[in-house]
Image (cartoon, rainbow, N blue to C red):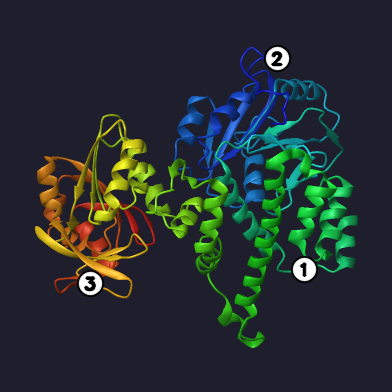
Amino acid sequence: MTKLGLRPYRGGDDPAPGSVPVSVVVLTRDEEVNIRRCLASVAWADQVVVVDSGSTDDTVPIAGSLGAEVVRNPWPGFSAQREFALRLPSVRHDWVYFVDADEWVSPQLAAEIAAQLRAPVCSGFAQRFRLVFQGTWIRHCGWYRGSWIVRLVDRRFTKYDGTWMARAHVNGPTGRLRSDLVDEDCKGLAAWLHKHVQYAQLEAERRDTPASLSQRLHALRTREDTRPMIRAVLKDVIFPSVPAKPAAIFAYMYLVRLGVLDGLAGLRFCFFHAWFEATVKALHADRQTMTYGASQPRAQEALVTASELKLRVSRIVAGDRAGRVIGGLTGKRIRHQGLWFDTRSSDFSPTVRAQMFWGGYEGAETRMIRSVLRGSSTVVELGSSLGVTAAHIAAVMAAGGHLVCVEANPTLLPGLRERMARHAAGLRVDLVHAAVTDHCGTAALTLAAETVGSRLDAAPRQDEYTVDVPALTLREIVSRMGLAEFDLVSDIEGSEVAFLLQDPAALKGCRRAVIELHATTMRDCAASVSDLVDAAVAAGFRVTARHGPVVALVRA
């Protein structure tokens, strides 16, 4: 590792805690992994404000416990959120310092900021970043020397440019700080790549209206941002005209800017930036096809929704081929929504690995579980499958709690048992091999040969086969486990009709639930998703959150 030669500020360092007249603003969403280090490193500021845009983890409680003032604001975009923070009435100082949750401040930087603010002669200050990528400071690749960004600003003379890059426009002189800010995200590579897919989509949208060379030169002459001129020329004037951008950017970063000197991390960093550019190009082409694919007079018919765009992107980045690449790069050890999973088992297909890598696999259920079931003492999960969702349930349950995992597919039970031993070590875990249906006895379960999918009482298609498995009702499961009260998580491909419509009294002891609903028919009882939501309300629940077919229910 290239040594930073820096450490985070801590108590006992100079300047003293709370002594510098500046308001530090930290924008957050699901940053529990990073937030403690970040806030501890800015304790020298008189005021620390966390602007949170909907965290579902412990970011907000942690921030509050460390003395930060927490303001909640739904995410309006990068520039708009910074502008919102600048104009907050609760911000006490004219000088505002923006620090991201995955960044930290050294004692040297804190002391320099304190010295500059005693008698400021500028309206803003730029500084460089020491980016730590996979444990290595990326000192080359063109990333460090030109990384000047304005973060310390006098808000009376500052506004943001409205782009997703969120550049500050400072009306007045801008100075430079000698000390660097450290960017060191502890979420891992998967989170970094997932974030950059989102950046790629924003960049693709920005490129929808390409500018001519004369327009780019005019924009350069009239620009208001504070980037170094050479960086602005390279990015805004030259780069748009460069052919084969992914190859060009890799060659420039790795060879011309000596990324090779940053070792394996440098190679990966340059590769992923080439991949980012390829992703932008693919998304941009996809947007153009969707908008103008039929013919210009029928352009409106070609427009698609954001969710459809997301689906098309997911087919590129979360398909079988992408999953094989991801498996090779990660050693099949994948971080999903904050938890690490060993996916070397054949239970995990390449597609599932890719979906987990990007956070899409059971993403809505996981977020609701973390929000709704935190602190639960007893949870019944119907359809535990690979055990990924069960691991997230275990992560939010109270110590010593009772987790009941119900799974019909016999081929998944050994892996499920192994994963629960790893992820739910502090809980009592019962594994129940059964299909949840409207009767007790046996049921015909149709299994896919190459995936974890299964269906009840369905004729097998090509590459499928049928096995008989134990069948239980939810009422019988609750009775056998001796549960008076419990929380429920269910993803059983339509069989939820057995308790929501046919036996709602089985939910008498249920206090909270996260259920993925499916339109289905069971023994001539047809039900739509709306029917099942209505049935849950009739059973005494209220819907507290919904994402597509996934609903969070709380006893009214």
The front one of 186 and 463 is 463
The residue tagged 2 is: 14
Which comes before the other along the chain, label 3 or label 2?
2
Image-based side of 358 in relation to 146, left or right: left
Three-letter amino acid code of the residue under disc 1: Pro
Circle 3 Cα neighbour tier, 10 Å, few/some/many (<14 / 14–19 / ≥20): few
The Cα–Cα distance between marks 2 and 1, rounded to whole angstroms, is 49 Å
Q: Report the quarter where the N terminus lies.
A: top right
Q: Which mark is residue 210?
A: 1
Pointer 2 or 1: first along the chain? 2
Mark 3–mark 2 distance (CA, rounded to whole Å): 70 Å
* Secondary structure of residue under mark 2: loop
- Sequence order check, earlier mark of 3 and 1: 1
Identify the amino acid type marked 3.
Ala
User: What is the CA distance from the residue labelled 3 to the residue labelled 1?
Assistant: 52 Å
**Residue 556 visible here:** no
Count residues near mark 2 (Cα–Cα under 10 Å), then give few for <14, some for 14-19, many for 20+: some
Q: Dot 3 lies on which element?
A: loop
Q: Residue at x 22, y 67 (%)?
A: 466
Q: Position of residue 137 (x, y in %)?
A: 71, 35
Kind of residue at disc 2: Asp
SS state under label 1:
loop
Nearer to us: label 3 or label 2: 3
Q: Which residue is mark 3?
A: 458
